[in-house]
Amino acid sequence: MDILKEISECLQQGDDQKVFAFTKQAIEEKVPPKEILECGLIGGMNIIGEKYRAFEIFLPDVLMAAKAMYAGMDLLKPLFIKEGIPTVGKVVIGTVQGDLHDLGKNLVGIMLKGAGFEVIDLGNNVPPERFVETAKKEGAYVIGMSALLTTTMPVMKRVVDLVKEEGLSGRIKIIIGGAPVTEEFAQKIGADAYAYDSVDAVESVKKLLKKP
Amino acid sequence: MRPVVRFLSGELIERIISEARDVLCKLGVEIHNKNILSMLQDHGAKVEIDRYHVLLTDKIIDRALETVPRFFKLYDVFGNQTHNFSGYNVYFTPGSTALNILDYDIKKIHRPKTSDYISYAKVISQLNNIASQSTALIPADVPEKISDSYRLYLSLLFCEKPVVTGAFTIEAFNIMKDLQLAVRGTKEKLALKPLTIFSCCPTSPVKWSDVTSQNLVDCAHYSIPVEFVSMPLSGFMAPVTLVGTLVQHTAETLSGVVISQLTNPGTPLLYGGSPAIFDVRYETTPMGAVETQMTDCAYNEIGKFLGMPTQAYISLSDSKQLDYQAGLESSMGATLAVLSGINNISGPGMLDFESCQSLEKLVLDNEICGMTLRMIKGIEPKEDFPSLPRFEELLREKHLLISKHTRRYLKEEFYFPGPTVDRASRTRWQKEGSVTLLERAHSEVEKLIKDYVPSKLSDSAKKELTKLMEKEARRYGMESLPPIPQVSCE
């Protein structure tokens, strides 16, 4: 079987050890790293995404595939850096200041990594300034914020305002989510996107990065 | 531990049975069938042939109860076992013999046609939580005299599941038996692996018509399982109290047990019924009433006490459409039924006092069935002890979504309903079109009809079924049967 197909299928089965082994073999066989990423790893994740949306598989299967994706990515990342190939994208995520609820945010992090993004997870109780400083320092194009408490939602607006004040609107996109957060709220505070779950978050981040 | 609900104490059950025996032995039963009366007379009962009246004796009742099977099994068209009516095993079957079908497009009822019946058969074939099919609709595009056998014919042709059915006339039994023989091969094979259950209904109070009692006898001759459908109406054709209703139900059902077992000892039976309270405000018999459902569960306890598997028309609604009432009554009935251990639970799909089937409701009820079937699996430890390693893993990994334990037990521990049950966030639900329950149910019905794969029953058996049915139709003046789509699977 074609090695890229092997990578894709092992990833769909959530077998991180085989994904690691086949990715290593592909690199040794001089398959271009970008091709390994796009046709092997991301190709497999795209199929996983379709199956998940069709209720053929459930979240644990997606997360297992994402874990397998990391195994391949760990081998590819040094090559991308060496060859100056840009990664899929860098995203800074965190739960906003005053809020310690990070389950949803963690899930989003796993899914973004599974889709090939580089994720800088700031954890919970993150002050507004830290989101912006980190995004600037790391060259991230997206800030993802989560809140479970209605009382902490205003912090999201503060981050949006800070990005504006620093003249970074358009360059750094902001996506928000969390149980009490709505699309209307996102529009009201000037965020670029809202996601209702982790799969939607990945789709939304992909769309944000395509937008000028 | 399997959860169980009970309504009657052992003492009360014994008293109800004792009172019912008194009714049968002192007031007697009206049976409009002279052959049966003669048979009972031969067994020592006091018979007044001209009044169609018989006084049973405790000895006769005891003899019948001694031979009635404590359990029996049911098999699909291939002879694979699908049911074991025993103990607290429970199975769902669609509500049967609806006069009407609720049309999704026009939101009105109409008399079902062959095409409606075929759509029903295609849908029920694929509903995993409903173990059997019933002859759920009465097709109105064939002569009335063959409408009972014709629905069995369509069921056997299009769906592989065993069938809960019944004959409307004495004559119809023959063709309905022949249709089964065409599938099973011989009388002996049919007796060994029953394919259908026939409903036989006494008339309240404590009467048997010529047709229903003869059906009972004919089924016994072929060892075809029978479910008794005694229908006392509390406050009208039965005492207003539930205990009084249960005495009458017990008497009516025991009289059926006697006829069946004295005809052919060992004939499989379901201690069933369709009692209801009588709503004196509307002059109706609500199947969704809480008291009706309590009576069902209670007579099931009496049936179990007598050592018989049970049946009830429960998990259905009196509503005219798929609304809150339909969900409330159907789910309450299904929940009580599984918790009571009613072995054959009839009702899914049914509305409007057992007169109207809805394919959309059938699909929705399938989810109620799935959830209740999960409920009775109870709460059992599954590699849960010792607990510390699991919690260490949780603290270490911060979640258990991909833990081996989660992946091993996720699908066993949770029942995942199909797309009709909305569990999306509001935003996702809105993004996906804000689709209503009814719209989702209809989409599912359309999908199931589209995805249907013809029954794998052999072409020769299908041809024989059609030959028999065509002959029967001609007997009643119908030269050709309504057109049906391709049924071959070969």
Image (cartoon, coloured by chain):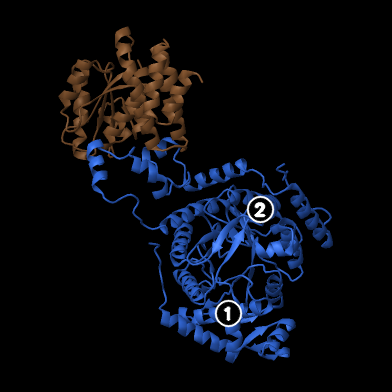
How far across and how far down the image is residue B2, in percent?
A: 40, 62
Q: Residue at x 44, y 25 (%)?
A: A44
Give the class, few, some or many, for how many residues have Cα within 10 Å of label 1's Cα (few <14, many ≥20). some
Callout 1: chain? B
> Residue B78 got which mark?
2
Q: Is residue B442 left or right of residue A63?
A: right
Callout 2: chain? B
Q: Type of residue at label 2?
A: Phe
Chain A in the picture: what colour? brown
> Residue B66 got which mark?
1
| Nearer the observer, A44 or B436 | A44
The blue one among the chains is: B
Circles 2 and 1 on the same subunit: yes
How far across and how far down the image is residue B243, in percent?
A: 46, 80
Quadrant position of the C terminus of chain B in the picture: top right
How far across and how far down the image is residue B209, in percent?
A: 68, 78
> Residue A165 got which mark?
none
How far across and how far down the image is residue B182, in percent?
A: 75, 57
Residue A108, compared with residue B56, is above or below; it is above
Q: Is residue A204 visible?
A: no
Residue B421, compared with residue B252, is above or below; it is above
Give the class, few, some or many, for how many residues have Cα within 10 Å of label 2's Cα (few <14, many ≥20). some
Label 2 or label 1, whichever comes before in sequence order: 1
- SS at circle 1: helix
Q: Is residue B62 visible?
A: yes
Q: Residue at x 30, y 13 (%)?
A: A78
Q: Type of residue at label 1?
A: Glu
The Cα atoms of the two marked residues, 2 and 1, are separated by 32 Å
